[in-house]
Image (tube, rainbow, N blue to C red):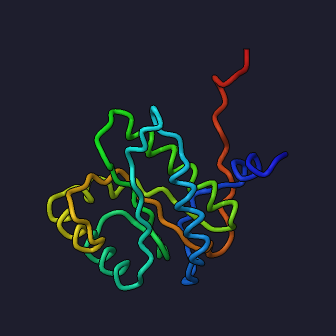
Amino acid sequence: MNDVLKCIDSRRSIREFTDEKIDENELAVLLKAALHAPSGRNDQPLFFVILKDDRKLSDFKNFLKTGNFYNAQAILFIFERKEDHLNDLNCGAAIENVLLAAESLGLGACWIHSARNRLNEEDSKAFMKDLLKFDKEYVALDAVALGHIKGLKPAMKPRNMANDKII
């Protein structure tokens, strides 16, 4: 089995992270994985920010008070550069790239969709605009918690393959 298929098979959502920081080079690999995701018409309508600064991470977690980021040592945010009816799909492709890249690096990652609505509320937008030093408005699509895995990786849950087949 090749390395990509091994990563697909072994990837799990990680919800416990150590306090160990993620290496800057590894963060660059994760950002590149997001940037290299396919997008409709190769329009590249998304942009990505990885928040790793301790103080800003703490400020973010204290402000948001929704969605659990599991002691993440970094958070990848996915934003719209421009509106596109395919952005949810574009976002999903970018996140899957990041999840698989994290797995390949021996890092843990968890897609945190529960924060999406809160990130787009007016008070959150003002807070995030200041926190991330944005010079214009944004629409947040999703987030991914990143870190070093604490403890054992969870076992794979059984897959329901009742209707899956090759004909």
Residue 98 or residue 36, whichever sits in front: 36
> Residue at image x 56%, y 62%?
30
Q: Residue furthest right?
A: 1
Q: Quadrant of the C terminus?
A: top right
Figure check: 58 above or below 153: below
Figure check: 54 above or below 40: below
Q: Is residue 150 left or right of residue 116?
A: right
- Determine the image quadrant of residue 77: bottom left
> Residue at image x 69%, y 67%?
106
Q: Residue furthest top?
A: 167
Residue 56 or residue 37, whichever sits in front: 37
Q: Quadrant of the N terminus?
A: top right
Q: Position of residue 140 (x, y in %)?
A: 31, 54
Residue 104 or residue 33, whichever sits in front: 33
Q: Position of residue 119 (x, y in %)?
A: 27, 59
- Determine the image quadrant of residue 53: bottom left
Figure check: 167 above or below 5: above
Count of picture labels: 0
Figure check: 78 above or below 69: above
Q: Is residue 58 left or right of residue 98?
A: left
> Residue at image x 23%, y 67%?
129
Q: Position of residue 136 (x, y in %)?
A: 20, 60
> Residue at image x 41%, y 64%?
49
Q: Position of residue 51 (x, y in %)?
A: 41, 72
